[in-house]
Amino acid sequence: MTHQPHPEAKSPATDFNPTQIRDTVRRLLDSEELPAIVQAGHPVLRQMAAPFDGQIDDVELMALVDRMRDVMHDAPGVGLAAPQLGIPLQVAVLEDKYEVDPASAAVRHREQLEFFAIINPEYRPLGIETASFYEGCLSVAGYQAVVTRHRNVELRFTNTAGEPMEEWFSGWQARIVQHETDHLHGCLYLDRAEIRSLSSNEEHSARWSAPQIEDARRALGFLH
């Protein structure tokens, strides 16, 4: 399968001015309650988020990252992008330290991922290998679908200290990196999914929770 670029976001980052972004972040940080996760259908999830270039100061940035981490843990999830909190800014957090079945982890090449934040990320495939597995999204609550993604990627991003970074990821970690970076470009996982594989969480748990997707592929008729 050849690499397909992510769908173009219909609204550019220039729709957002720095004052609007700063005010949105400050309202979120001023609240004592954890913010709700924005769901599919909200325009912020379909817009190219604004590259971070100092719209908020260093203290606010770190506070935002901490709040995003809290929301991700509360959900729970393995990643969260700022647009999922209604903030059109290219910032995301990632972490995967959940205990999973060893057999499933082996099939999916899933290893624990320490917490880190990414700013203005971009990824590119390393090689042509792909992997197809079910995945879900906190902004498409209640559903999962099979997505074919690059097995290995290079991620270029800026860290919270303002340093340019370049790291390689493989397996499930690469999947998380691609999913969260896509969010910042106005792309949901459903844009890349095998739509015939779409399953409610209940049906997925009852029928398709095996590490491999072969049973689902045959029964639901996708990836022929």
Image (tube, rainbow, N blue to C red):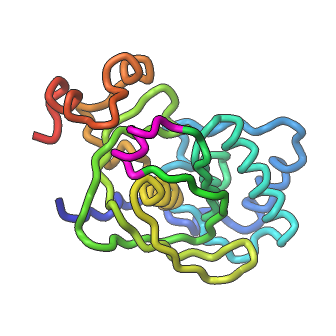
At a point 32% along the width and 19% down the height, the residue shown is 207
Range drawn in magenta: 100-109
At a point 63% along the width and 58% down the height, the residue shown is 114
Occupied quadrant, residue 157? bottom right
User: Magenta region, mostly helix, strand or loop?
Assistant: helix
Residue at the limit of the structure toward the bottom, as seen here = 164
103 within the magenta span? yes
Residue at the limit of the structure toward the front, as seen here = 102
- Decide which of 14, 181 is in the foreground and name it: 181
Residue 208 x, y percent position in the rendering:
32, 25
98 within the magenta span? no
At a point 71% along the width and 42% down the height, the residue shown is 71
- In this rendering, would 155 be left or right of 77? left
Residue 119 x, y percent position in the rendering:
63, 69
The N terminus - image quarter = bottom left
Residue 142 x, y percent position in the rendering:
48, 26
- Decide which of 3, 214 is in the foreground and name it: 214
- In this rendering, would 138 be left or right of 188? right
The C terminus - image quarter = top left
Residue 26 x, y percent position in the rendering:
84, 54
Occupied quadrant, residue 199? top left
At a point 59% along the width and 80% down the height, the residue shown is 165
- Decide which of 172, 149 is in the foreground and name it: 172
The answer to whether residue 142 is seen in the rendering is: yes
